[in-house]
């Protein structure tokens, strides 16, 4: 086997095979579940319930797409681990009777790799990247209840090997009339792989069901969010060990329950500024190092808002080896023109 084929094989194993100690990794197109928004990253990595004018929230739950996001443009860039970077851009528009629409593009760039022959001689280079379009639609009913869908054509390109697939998100959301409480639920990444990389068996997409609730205090500058991931499967833990008979000791009920939980809090002293914190229990349990747990699983961020421009930063600690840095720029050119 040539060195180039060995490189590709390693990439395919990393991308497509199950990881024993982590949730995920047993599906294709796992990049669909990455966190793109700095605000969402700071809240623990997933949120499907916050109802306001932030277009990035519609990426997590298409039912959150609203007319308050009309003519909004968001740009997200993430400095990830090991030199990997990814991002998302999205633009929205509302039509009075037809509903709310948005279109976007997400990408994941693994970087450039050296290509070599069996003798180790460098013969060139190749790139590895994945892309997905996002086509969103939502409709509000009875002023407080909304539904939405997001169609995502997916293209994965690993050197000369490519795969194409279709994913679909279906969501619902509710918010109180005073906008203090909101909730959402979404079925994510239902779909299939249309073409495979090398003619292998078609693989599953990273399907999951997520639900959450958010509440802002009526007389205080705080909003709290609770999100539950992987509702389609209760036990997402791994075995802790085995006894002499080979019987595995399973996690207790409380551990199984907490693995689904993501908690977030926002401090909002003024409508033009926020500071946020998040805690992802599953991420901490999967990636912590027992000798030094540190802040693995925790995240934080902040943002500045004006009527036509917003900037956000989020940082999430995955492991002692590093953290991801998320940058978000939101523009509302329609409001600027009016001014």
Image (cartoon, grey):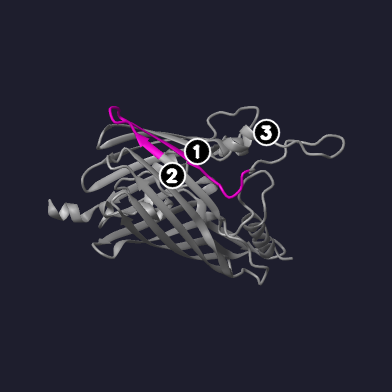
Of residues 182 and 258, which is closer to you in this image?
182
Q: Residue furthest right?
A: 245
Q: Is residue 331 above or below residue 322?
A: below
Say whether disc 3 or disc 1 marks the residue closer to the N-terminus. 3
Q: Is disc 3 in contact with disc 1, using a CB cutoff of under 8 Å?
A: no
Say whether disc 2 or disc 3 marks the residue closer to the N-terminus. 2
Find residue 210 and name its label. none
Find residue 252 and name its label. 3
Helix or strand or loop: what does disc 2 sit on? loop
**How many numbered marks appear?**
3
Location of residue 258 by image quarter: top right
Q: Is residue 101 above or below residue 215?
A: below
Q: Is disc 2 in contact with disc 3, using a CB cutoff of under 8 Å?
A: no
User: Which residue in the structure is indicated by mark 1?
Assistant: 262
Helix or strand or loop: what does disc 3 sit on? loop
Q: Is disc 2 in contact with disc 1, using a CB cutoff of under 8 Å?
A: yes
User: Which residue in the structure is indicated by mark 2?
Assistant: 47
* The residue stretch that appears in magenta: 214-234
Q: Residue at x 43, y 38 (%)?
A: 43
Label 2 packing within 10 angstroms: few (<14), some (14-19), many (20+)? many
Residue 111 percent location from the top left of the image = 52, 56
Of residues 182 and 314, which is closer to you in this image?
182
Q: Does residue 1 show up magenta in the picture?
A: no
Q: Residue at x 61, y 63 (%)?
A: 115
Mark 2 vs mark 1, CA separation in Å: 8 Å
């Amino acid at each position: 086997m040539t060195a180039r084929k060995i490189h590709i094989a390693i990439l395919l194993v990393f991308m497509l095979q199950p990881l024993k100690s982590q949730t995920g990794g047993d599906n294709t197109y796992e990049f669909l579940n990455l966190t793109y928004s700095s605000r969402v990253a700071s809240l623990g990595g997933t949120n499907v319930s916050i109802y306001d004018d932030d277009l990035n929230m519609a990426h997590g739950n298409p039912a959150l797409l609203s007319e308050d996001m009309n003519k909004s443009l968001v740009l997200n860039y993430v400095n990830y681990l090991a030199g990997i970077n990814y991002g998302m851009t999205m633009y929205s528009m509302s039509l009075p009777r037809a509903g709310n629409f948005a279109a976007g593009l997400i990408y994941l760039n693994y970087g450039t790799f050296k290509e070599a022959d069996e003798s180790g001689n460098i013969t060139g280079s190749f790139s590895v990247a994945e892309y997905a379009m996002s086509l969103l639609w939502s409709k509000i009913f009875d002023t407080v209840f909304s539904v939405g869908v997001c169609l995502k054509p997916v293209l994965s390109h690993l050197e000369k090997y490519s795969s194409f697939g279709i994913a679909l998100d279906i969501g619902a959301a509710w918010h109180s009339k005073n906008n203090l409480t909101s909730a959402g639920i979404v079925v994510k990444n239902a779909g299939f792989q249309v073409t495979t990389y090398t003619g292998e068996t078609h693989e599953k997409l990273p399907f999951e069901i997520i639900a959450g609730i958010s509440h802002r205090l009526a007389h205080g500058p705080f909003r709290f969010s609770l999100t539950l991931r992987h509702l389609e499967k209760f036990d997402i833990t791994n075995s802790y060990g085995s006894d002499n008979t080979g019987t595995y000791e399973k996690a207790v009920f409380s551990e199984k329950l907490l693995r689904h939980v993501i908690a977030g809090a926002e401090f909002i002293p003024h409508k033009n500024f926020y500071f946020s914190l998040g805690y992802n229990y599953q991420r901490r349990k999967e990636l912590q190092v027992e000798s030094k747990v540190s802040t693995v699983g925790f995240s934080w961020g902040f943002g500045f808002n004006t009527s036509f421009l917003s900037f956000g930063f989020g940082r999430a600690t995955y492991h002692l080896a590093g953290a991801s840095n998320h940058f978000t720029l939101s523009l509302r050119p329609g409001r600027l023109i009016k001014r």
